[in-house]
Image (spheres, rainbow, N blue to C red):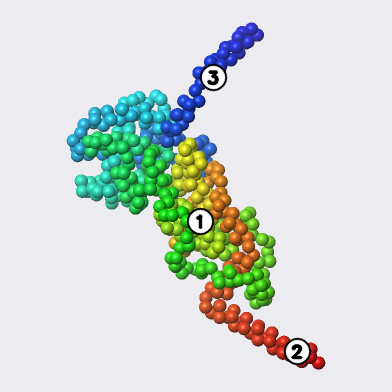
Amino acid sequence: MAEEKNENENMYAIDIQSEYESYDPSEYESKLEKRCIYRWPNDLVITSSLSKHRTPHMVSLGPFHHRKEHLQPMEHHKVRALFRILKKSNVSTSDFIKSLKDVEQELRDSYDNLDQKMTSDSFLRMMLLDGCFMLELFRTRLQGEPEYPDDPVFNLRGVVMDTVINRDMMILENQIPLLVLRKLQGIVEKKEINDDTYLKNLFGRIYGFSDTSPVNKPNLHILDVYRKCLIKECAPTKQTTPTTQVPSNPVSTQGPSRLHGASEKVKSMLTSIPILDFRALCCRPITKSNVRSAMRFHEAGVEFRKRDPYNGLRVTFDKENGVLTLPVILVHNHTAAIYVNIMAFERMHSKLWTDQKMISFVGFMDSLVDTAEDVNLLCSRGIMTNLLGSDEEAAEVFNNLLIGIPHCPDYEVYDPLQKYVASYWNAARAYLKRKYFKNPWAAVSLLAAIFLLVLTFIQTLFTVLPFIHK
């Protein structure tokens, strides 16, 4: 019995040694480089607040959700899209299949952990129907749909269905490679298409991106293009202070106070005046651990301004003037689904491990938005547009997005921001501005009080001087 056990162990060692000698690390690296469509990592799947965003609601694209029962009604519309394209382009189905067959292995390699039991015919048919559906959907959105006057899917008046389908096209597990669309469009136009110019224009119109030119190639899939459009930076990266006037709102943010450049002596004189009532400044210093939300930053003297929309997701802080500049954010029913799938893509795709701009941005917003007051402040500055039912719902979106997703803060912004709000003088300036310069009458009252204080001091001085002289 012992001899048989030793023999089995020897055979196992021989097998491992044989596998080691034939192992080629470059083979795995090559596969990793080709992958761009992934299943969600398991730790995100088991997070109940986020897992609902990994499943499409209306249409399946690609193999991961292909046979889900609740998505089957849309399969009929995929066939309708194929028939419409065949009729207009005057090509045959075999032309499409042959074009996709030439790149079948490349398409399969795009998927992580693809079911190898899926036959070639099933895979190519799925790619053909999904690709034609997306092309026809894009075309009708760009050119109009006179041939679809009362269609529930391809008519622009179907707003609810349209927004849900747009949301489904942002799901990481619900992607098809853009190579499929290039091949199919090439057959329709009877020429080889090697870039995504046409597709980017179609895509930009649907999702409201006026300029898709900064989107670099190669583009992997629709979610990849959306991410690139979202983080693109067209303007120079040099920080400039916006000159746009901030609209009036319940929470006042005037320009930087003239007291900002005052000398230490003037600062000391101001803070020694009892009527200024700086008792709030006697508390412990503001530190990284207790400054998180937008309202706390505002109370510490930080001014919020919106960034040029062509600057992507860049967040900058002007420490000289205390201005935090943020991109314009639209919060709606599908914001959480889109953001979390982009973050899952950044986490899974090997080429984005050092370029996780969305994760970094959402991490900063998670720190900035804690309550409905923070949402109200950002909305009043024109930074955030909230299309949800309440500010509490918008705050909840950002509070739940980073569950299960590790991130590293952007210390180039975070450190100078924390240093600025930890300053007693900046906090005092903000307190003075909020309490005494919020409206003209408060400012007049403060100046009158200071004037009376000076007169009282002069009167007292002249009263005491004769006694000193004697």
- The residue that disc 3 covers is 20
Q: Position of residue 129 (x, y in %)?
A: 30, 35
Q: Is residue 393 left or right of residue 448?
A: left
Occupied quadrant, residue 200:
top left
Rendered residue at 44%/29% (across/down): 31
Occupied quadrant, residue 88:
top left
Q: Are marks 2 and 1 in contact (CB under 8 Å)?
A: no
Q: Which mark is residue 465?
A: 2
Q: Secondary structure at mark 3?
A: helix
Instruction: Between residue 389 and residue 61, name the one nearer to us.
Output: 61
- Amino acid type at mark 2: Leu
Rendered residue at 35%/24% (across/down): 119
Q: Are marks 2 and 3 in contact (CB under 8 Å)?
A: no
Task: Kindly report which numbered mark, 2 or 3, lies closer to the viewer in this rendering.
Answer: 2
Q: Position of residue 340 (x, y in %)?
A: 47, 45
Q: Secondary structure at mark 1?
A: strand
- Amino acid type at mark 1: Thr
Q: Earlier in the sequence, mark 2 or mark 1?
A: 1
In the rendered image of this protein, does residue 130 appear above or below residue 271?
above
Instruction: Between residue 184 and residue 77, name the one nearer to us.
Output: 184
Q: Which mark is residue 316?
A: 1
The C terminus sits in image quarter: bottom right
Residue sitting at the far right = 470
- Amino acid type at mark 3: Tyr
Q: Is residue 297 left or right of residue 189?
A: right
Q: Earlier in the sequence, mark 1 or mark 3?
A: 3
Instruction: Between residue 214 and residue 151, name the one nearer to us.
Output: 214
Rendered residue at 38%/43% (across/down): 216
Q: Is residue 83 left or right of residue 369?
A: left
